[in-house]
Image (cartoon, rainbow, N blue to C red):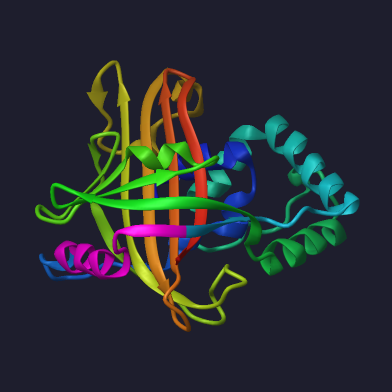
Amino acid sequence: MTFLYRYICLSWLLAALVLSIDVFAQKQPSVDSNAVAVQFVDRLLSEGDYTAAVLGIPRQDASQVAIVEKMKLAIKDNEQWFLNVMKELEPGQPMPYHKNLGISEAEYAAFMQFSQSIKIDKIGAIALKIIRRHSSIHFEPKDFGDYLKYLTIDLKDHRIMVDSIDLPYKGQITMDAQRTTLVAGPWKGYSWRLEEFRKDGQLIVDPNKVVPAEISKLDVKAIELIIGKLDHSDQCFLYLKSNIINKGHVLAKQDIALLLTKE
Protein backbone atom coordinates (compact mmCIF):
# COMPACT_ATOMS: atom_id res chain seq x y z
CA MET A 1 0.00 0.00 0.00
CA THR A 2 1.50 3.33 -1.00
CA PHE A 3 2.09 6.08 1.52
CA LEU A 4 -0.34 8.39 -0.27
CA TYR A 5 -3.11 5.78 -0.22
CA ARG A 6 -2.42 5.20 3.47
CA TYR A 7 -2.75 8.93 4.07
CA ILE A 8 -6.04 9.14 2.17
CA CYS A 9 -7.38 6.17 4.13
CA LEU A 10 -6.28 7.85 7.35
CA SER A 11 -8.50 10.81 6.58
CA TRP A 12 -11.11 8.43 8.08
CA LEU A 13 -8.48 8.19 10.81
CA LEU A 14 -6.80 5.32 12.54
CA ALA A 15 -8.90 2.60 10.93
CA ALA A 16 -5.73 1.56 9.14
CA LEU A 17 -4.18 0.78 12.52
CA VAL A 18 -7.06 -1.58 13.24
CA LEU A 19 -8.21 -3.08 9.94
CA SER A 20 -5.14 -3.10 7.65
CA ILE A 21 -5.90 -6.66 6.62
CA ASP A 22 -3.98 -6.36 3.36
CA VAL A 23 -0.68 -6.07 5.24
CA PHE A 24 -0.29 -9.82 5.02
CA ALA A 25 -0.88 -10.20 1.30
CA GLN A 26 1.74 -12.56 -0.08
CA LYS A 27 2.72 -11.86 -3.68
CA GLN A 28 2.92 -15.00 -5.75
CA PRO A 29 5.72 -15.47 -8.31
CA SER A 30 3.70 -17.40 -10.88
CA VAL A 31 2.22 -15.47 -13.80
CA ASP A 32 -0.88 -17.68 -13.46
CA SER A 33 -1.57 -16.65 -9.86
CA ASN A 34 -4.45 -14.40 -10.87
CA ALA A 35 -6.07 -17.28 -12.75
CA VAL A 36 -5.68 -19.49 -9.68
CA ALA A 37 -7.27 -16.79 -7.53
CA VAL A 38 -10.24 -16.35 -9.88
CA GLN A 39 -10.71 -20.14 -10.00
CA PHE A 40 -10.80 -20.09 -6.19
CA VAL A 41 -13.60 -17.51 -6.34
CA ASP A 42 -15.38 -19.57 -9.01
CA ARG A 43 -15.48 -22.58 -6.67
CA LEU A 44 -16.43 -20.51 -3.65
CA LEU A 45 -19.27 -18.40 -5.04
CA SER A 46 -21.86 -20.51 -6.78
CA GLU A 47 -25.03 -18.97 -8.13
CA GLY A 48 -27.92 -18.62 -5.74
CA ASP A 49 -29.33 -16.84 -2.70
CA TYR A 50 -27.11 -15.90 0.24
CA THR A 51 -27.47 -14.43 3.68
CA ALA A 52 -24.76 -11.80 4.13
CA ALA A 53 -23.71 -10.79 7.62
CA VAL A 54 -22.70 -7.13 7.53
CA LEU A 55 -19.45 -6.75 9.47
CA GLY A 56 -18.30 -3.71 11.41
CA ILE A 57 -16.34 -2.43 14.39
CA PRO A 58 -18.02 -2.59 17.80
CA ARG A 59 -18.98 0.82 19.22
CA GLN A 60 -16.24 2.38 21.34
CA ASP A 61 -16.89 3.51 24.89
CA ALA A 62 -16.80 7.19 25.88
CA SER A 63 -13.16 7.18 27.02
CA GLN A 64 -12.00 5.56 23.79
CA VAL A 65 -13.96 8.04 21.68
CA ALA A 66 -12.43 10.93 23.63
CA ILE A 67 -8.89 9.69 22.96
CA VAL A 68 -9.55 9.28 19.24
CA GLU A 69 -11.11 12.75 18.96
CA LYS A 70 -8.09 14.36 20.65
CA MET A 71 -5.79 12.50 18.27
CA LYS A 72 -7.80 13.68 15.26
CA LEU A 73 -7.46 17.32 16.27
CA ALA A 74 -3.75 16.98 17.07
CA ILE A 75 -2.97 15.23 13.78
CA LYS A 76 -4.81 17.98 11.89
CA ASP A 77 -2.69 20.60 13.68
CA ASN A 78 0.53 18.65 13.03
CA GLU A 79 -0.25 17.33 9.57
CA GLN A 80 3.23 17.66 8.05
CA TRP A 81 4.83 15.87 10.99
CA PHE A 82 2.20 13.13 10.80
CA LEU A 83 2.76 12.65 7.08
CA ASN A 84 6.52 12.42 7.55
CA VAL A 85 6.13 9.79 10.28
CA MET A 86 3.66 7.73 8.25
CA LYS A 87 5.99 7.84 5.26
CA GLU A 88 8.78 6.20 7.25
CA LEU A 89 6.69 3.41 8.76
CA GLU A 90 6.86 -0.10 7.35
CA PRO A 91 3.50 -1.74 6.51
CA GLY A 92 1.98 -3.03 9.73
CA GLN A 93 4.42 -1.11 11.93
CA PRO A 94 2.61 0.88 14.65
CA MET A 95 3.27 4.57 15.04
CA PRO A 96 5.46 5.31 18.09
CA TYR A 97 4.16 7.67 20.75
CA HIS A 98 4.82 11.38 20.31
CA LYS A 99 3.45 14.42 22.11
CA ASN A 100 2.19 15.72 18.75
CA LEU A 101 -0.53 13.07 18.96
CA GLY A 102 -2.20 15.31 21.54
CA ILE A 103 -2.57 12.66 24.22
CA SER A 104 -0.50 11.31 27.09
CA GLU A 105 1.66 8.20 26.90
CA ALA A 106 -0.87 6.40 29.12
CA GLU A 107 -3.72 7.38 26.80
CA TYR A 108 -1.72 6.23 23.78
CA ALA A 109 -1.02 2.90 25.48
CA ALA A 110 -4.75 2.54 26.13
CA PHE A 111 -5.49 3.43 22.49
CA MET A 112 -3.04 0.84 21.20
CA GLN A 113 -4.50 -1.79 23.51
CA PHE A 114 -8.11 -1.31 22.45
CA SER A 115 -7.28 -0.72 18.76
CA GLN A 116 -5.20 -3.88 18.47
CA SER A 117 -7.81 -5.98 20.26
CA ILE A 118 -10.72 -4.86 18.08
CA LYS A 119 -12.20 -7.48 15.79
CA ILE A 120 -14.90 -6.96 13.22
CA ASP A 121 -18.14 -8.79 13.90
CA LYS A 122 -21.71 -8.99 12.68
CA ILE A 123 -23.68 -5.76 13.05
CA GLY A 124 -26.53 -6.66 10.70
CA ALA A 125 -27.65 -8.96 7.88
CA ILE A 126 -28.90 -8.59 4.32
CA ALA A 127 -30.13 -10.83 1.53
CA LEU A 128 -27.78 -11.17 -1.42
CA LYS A 129 -28.17 -12.93 -4.75
CA ILE A 130 -25.24 -14.10 -6.86
CA ILE A 131 -25.92 -14.44 -10.57
CA ARG A 132 -23.84 -16.10 -13.27
CA ARG A 133 -24.21 -14.36 -16.60
CA HIS A 134 -21.95 -14.57 -19.69
CA SER A 135 -19.27 -16.46 -17.73
CA SER A 136 -19.20 -13.73 -15.10
CA ILE A 137 -20.26 -13.42 -11.46
CA HIS A 138 -22.58 -10.54 -10.58
CA PHE A 139 -23.99 -9.42 -7.22
CA GLU A 140 -27.51 -8.25 -6.38
CA PRO A 141 -27.70 -7.04 -2.76
CA LYS A 142 -30.92 -6.01 -1.05
CA ASP A 143 -31.27 -3.03 1.31
CA PHE A 144 -27.51 -2.43 1.66
CA GLY A 145 -24.30 -2.46 -0.29
CA ASP A 146 -25.63 -1.25 -3.65
CA TYR A 147 -22.00 -0.61 -4.66
CA LEU A 148 -21.62 -4.38 -5.02
CA LYS A 149 -23.73 -4.13 -8.17
CA TYR A 150 -20.69 -2.55 -9.85
CA LEU A 151 -18.48 -5.56 -9.04
CA THR A 152 -17.98 -8.10 -11.83
CA ILE A 153 -15.81 -11.21 -11.75
CA ASP A 154 -15.04 -12.39 -15.27
CA LEU A 155 -14.37 -16.13 -14.97
CA LYS A 156 -13.39 -16.59 -18.60
CA ASP A 157 -10.82 -13.81 -18.93
CA HIS A 158 -9.85 -13.82 -15.23
CA ARG A 159 -10.68 -10.17 -14.72
CA ILE A 160 -11.91 -8.39 -11.60
CA MET A 161 -13.76 -5.17 -12.39
CA VAL A 162 -15.50 -2.48 -10.34
CA ASP A 163 -17.58 -0.13 -12.47
CA SER A 164 -15.64 -1.41 -15.53
CA ILE A 165 -12.30 -0.54 -13.85
CA ASP A 166 -9.87 -3.48 -13.86
CA LEU A 167 -8.24 -4.33 -10.53
CA PRO A 168 -4.73 -5.83 -10.74
CA TYR A 169 -4.07 -9.02 -8.80
CA LYS A 170 -2.02 -8.36 -5.64
CA GLY A 171 -1.54 -11.61 -3.80
CA GLN A 172 -2.67 -14.39 -1.52
CA ILE A 173 -3.66 -13.67 2.07
CA THR A 174 -3.43 -16.04 5.03
CA MET A 175 -5.02 -14.78 8.25
CA ASP A 176 -4.37 -17.36 10.94
CA ALA A 177 -5.82 -17.39 14.44
CA GLN A 178 -3.35 -14.74 15.64
CA ARG A 179 -3.65 -12.40 12.68
CA THR A 180 -7.33 -12.56 11.81
CA THR A 181 -9.45 -9.46 12.34
CA LEU A 182 -12.66 -11.51 12.14
CA VAL A 183 -14.52 -12.79 15.18
CA ALA A 184 -15.63 -15.60 12.86
CA GLY A 185 -12.08 -16.95 12.81
CA PRO A 186 -9.08 -17.52 10.52
CA TRP A 187 -9.38 -17.43 6.75
CA LYS A 188 -7.44 -17.59 3.49
CA GLY A 189 -8.05 -15.72 0.28
CA TYR A 190 -6.81 -13.35 -2.41
CA SER A 191 -6.66 -9.63 -3.02
CA TRP A 192 -6.93 -7.30 -6.02
CA ARG A 193 -6.13 -3.61 -5.75
CA LEU A 194 -5.83 -0.54 -7.97
CA GLU A 195 -3.98 2.56 -6.80
CA GLU A 196 -3.87 5.29 -9.44
CA PHE A 197 -3.01 8.93 -8.87
CA ARG A 198 -3.11 11.61 -11.55
CA LYS A 199 -2.42 15.34 -11.67
CA ASP A 200 -3.77 17.32 -14.62
CA GLY A 201 -4.46 14.02 -16.36
CA GLN A 202 -0.89 12.79 -16.03
CA LEU A 203 -0.19 9.57 -14.14
CA ILE A 204 2.02 10.07 -11.08
CA VAL A 205 4.70 7.38 -11.22
CA ASP A 206 5.80 7.76 -7.59
CA PRO A 207 2.87 8.94 -5.41
CA ASN A 208 5.16 9.03 -2.36
CA LYS A 209 6.76 12.20 -3.75
CA VAL A 210 3.49 14.13 -3.73
CA VAL A 211 3.55 16.99 -1.21
CA PRO A 212 0.50 17.38 1.08
CA ALA A 213 -0.45 20.72 -0.48
CA GLU A 214 -1.04 18.99 -3.83
CA ILE A 215 -3.36 16.28 -2.55
CA SER A 216 -6.47 18.41 -3.18
CA LYS A 217 -5.39 18.74 -6.84
CA LEU A 218 -5.18 15.01 -7.52
CA ASP A 219 -7.50 12.57 -9.21
CA VAL A 220 -7.46 9.35 -7.19
CA LYS A 221 -8.70 5.84 -7.92
CA ALA A 222 -8.04 3.54 -4.97
CA ILE A 223 -10.12 0.34 -5.08
CA GLU A 224 -9.52 -2.93 -3.26
CA LEU A 225 -11.28 -6.29 -3.27
CA ILE A 226 -10.53 -9.20 -0.94
CA ILE A 227 -12.31 -12.54 -1.17
CA GLY A 228 -11.53 -15.38 1.20
CA LYS A 229 -12.88 -18.57 2.76
CA LEU A 230 -13.10 -19.25 6.48
CA ASP A 231 -10.93 -22.15 7.59
CA HIS A 232 -13.67 -23.85 9.58
CA SER A 233 -16.70 -23.38 7.32
CA ASP A 234 -17.77 -22.69 3.74
CA GLN A 235 -18.53 -19.05 4.54
CA CYS A 236 -17.03 -16.44 2.23
CA PHE A 237 -15.44 -13.22 3.48
CA LEU A 238 -15.86 -10.37 1.00
CA TYR A 239 -14.30 -6.94 1.50
CA LEU A 240 -14.73 -4.11 -1.01
CA LYS A 241 -13.22 -0.69 -0.43
CA SER A 242 -13.33 2.19 -2.88
CA ASN A 243 -12.06 5.76 -2.72
CA ILE A 244 -12.47 7.73 -5.95
CA ILE A 245 -11.66 11.45 -5.78
CA ASN A 246 -11.62 14.17 -8.41
CA LYS A 247 -9.53 17.15 -7.28
CA GLY A 248 -10.68 16.93 -3.68
CA HIS A 249 -14.27 16.02 -4.53
CA VAL A 250 -15.27 12.53 -3.40
CA LEU A 251 -17.06 10.65 -6.18
CA ALA A 252 -17.21 7.25 -4.46
CA LYS A 253 -16.32 6.22 -0.94
CA GLN A 254 -17.29 2.71 0.08
CA ASP A 255 -16.15 0.28 2.75
CA ILE A 256 -18.14 -2.98 2.70
CA ALA A 257 -17.31 -6.12 4.67
CA LEU A 258 -19.58 -9.16 4.44
CA LEU A 259 -19.63 -12.78 5.51
CA LEU A 260 -21.63 -14.81 2.98
CA THR A 261 -23.56 -17.99 3.77
CA LYS A 262 -25.45 -19.77 1.00
CA GLU A 263 -29.06 -20.57 1.78
In the image, what residue occupies the spot 40% across and 43% down? 148
In the image, what residue occupies the spot 17% across and 67% down? 33
Residue 141 location in percent, x, y? 45, 45
Residue 95 falls inside the magenta stretch: no
Of residues 20 and 186, the one nearer the viewer is 186
- Give the image quarter of residue 74: top right
Query: Up-down: is 213 above or below 228?
Result: above
Residue 48 falls inside the magenta stretch: yes
Of residues 180 and 93, the one nearer the viewer is 180
- Give the image quarter of residue 94: bottom right
Q: Quadrant of the C terminus?
A: bottom left
Q: Magenta stretch?
A: 34-50
Is residue 91 something that shows in the picture? no
Q: From the viewer's perspective, is 56 left or right of 177?
A: right
Of residues 206 and 138, the one nearer the viewer is 138
In the image, what residue occupies the spot 43% across and 25% down? 245
> Looking at the magenta stretch, what is its main secondary structure?
helix
Of residues 58 and 151, the one nearer the viewer is 151
Residue 201 location in percent, x, y? 25, 18
Q: From the viewer's perspective, is 117 left or right of 84?
A: right
Residue 56 location in percent, x, y? 63, 54
Is residue 177 something that shows in the picture? yes
Query: Up-down: is 183 above or below 131?
Result: below
Residue 78 location in percent, x, y? 68, 34
- Give the image quarter of residue 239: bottom left
Q: From the viewer's perspective, is 139 left or right of 63?
A: left
Q: From the viewer's perspective, is 123 left or right of 137?
A: right
